Image (tube, helix red, strand yellow):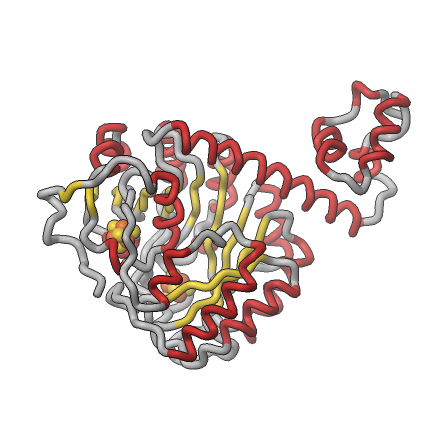
Amino acid sequence: MLGRDKVCAECRLACLTRRSAHDYRRRMFRRGSGPCLCARINGSMMPGTKKSLRRRFSGVHRRLRGAKEVVRALLSTDHPLLAHIIPIRRCNLACKYCNEFDDRSKAVPSAEMFRRVDKLAELGTAVITISGGEPLLHPDLDLIIRRIRHQGVITGLITNGYLLTAERIQRLNKAGLEWLQISIDNVMPDEISKKSLKVLDRKLELLAEHAYFHVNINSVVGGGVKNPQDALVIGRRAVELGFSSTVGIIHDGGGQLQPLNEEERQVYQAMKSLEKRSFTRINQFQENIARGRPNDWKCRAGARYLYICEDGLVHYCSQQRGYPAIPLENYTIDHIRREYVTEKSCAPHCTVSCVHQVSIFDRWRAPQRRAPTAAGGLVEID
Ligand code: SF4
Ligand code: SF4
């Protein structure tokens, strides 16, 4: 039997945040006796209930940490809100539209990845997302995730999902992963993409069964996807399994935007209605792209968003590798302040929604000016 003082922080938080069990646990705390919720979890509680509680606790914890970062973002412009890091450029697939992979690169040594994570934490980065290539090919991915969590940074992973197994998902749980995204391009695999629901549906079921972290399934329209209706099938399946669902407008292999036709636009609108459970619901950005309109926004890449390639260089984003291309170890608050006010000529037709989302925090803040170094050098997106 455990007294009130021995009730763990996890159970106290659950008591404060979960209405359904609130009264029961409050009685436990008042009495000063009875099993702590943890004891129940580790003892007689049914496995399904334990899993459900772990998920709820992880969700509450994730939302509280997210809220704290939102406040910090509003109070200061001197730190990155999101960084993508690439532990390996190699991928086990070869999607035709993709310009972010190769078939031969070695994994970045773990010690180097730890240094990069530590440096991003030192810069005050709120969220680090591990991307690729295919990050599950990195032999020490779990250690990298642990390092990010150890630094107090919110941790995400973007994967094609092919290498997920029940055991691999449980290792990601243990490492402390907080959210994971899989992009599924079609229902049946074709010559453009093998990231199909047919192949990945079993992986989604495994995630629904084992993952404690948040899962988002992204589907795409445009860019040569043969059947636009596939995005809806994928989105509905994601929601059915309890995941959030988002839709992206795909760019082609040259980073160029393909305008949506009428059917694609209709699917896109239907998909947006499935997005109500997602943090991307504020995304007016893609609405304009879907209609072929330019966006009027200030891209804060290089400041609020950093893309760290496998060589450890900071770039604006995956589509503008080459600027500013400064080694992360030399990146300072002066670079952040300079890039914060640097206008990017590619902004009006940009499709990189994650950069737009983090830039929303500073929408009404400092005006930007064109930098001489970047002028004329960026890939223009028409
Ligand atoms: S889109 Fe993802 S899965 Fe496809 S080739 Fe690129 S990195 Fe690999
Ligand atoms: S506007 Fe888009 S493409 Fe250009 S630097 Fe910003 S995120 Fe990258």
Q: Residue at x 54, y 53 (%)?
A: 278
Most extreme residue toward the top is 5
**Above or below: residue 70 compared with residue 351:** above
The N terminus is located in which quarter? Answer: top right
- Measured along the vertical axis of the image, is residue 381 above or below residue 281? below
Q: Is residue 380 left or right of residue 118?
A: left
Relative to residue 20, is residue 286 drawn left or right?
Answer: left
Please count the marks in the image. 0
Residue at horizontal 78%, vertical 25%?
7
Q: Position of residue 223 (x, y in %)?
A: 34, 72
Q: From the viewer's perspective, is residue 279 above or below residue 41?
A: below
Answer left or right for 65 relative to 299. Answer: right
Query: Residue 63, position in %: x, y?
Result: 58, 39
Quadrant in the picture for residue 255: bottom left
Q: At x 54% / y 59%, what residue is drawn?
A: 275
Q: Quadrant of residue 36?
A: top right
Occupied quadrant, residue 268: bottom left
Residue pushed farthest front? 364
- Vertical position of residue 251 compared to residue 150: above or below: below
Task: From the viewer's perspective, tell me whether residue 71 is left or right of residue 304.
Answer: right
Residue 308 appears anywhere in the view = yes
Between 104 and 230, the one nearer to me in the picture: 230
Tell me the quadrant of the picture where the C terminus can be found.
bottom left
Residue at point 52%, 44% (across, down): 142
From where the camera sits, is residue 326 visible?
no
Across and down, in percent, residue 48 comes to 78, 52
Residue 225 point in image, percent of width and height: 40, 76
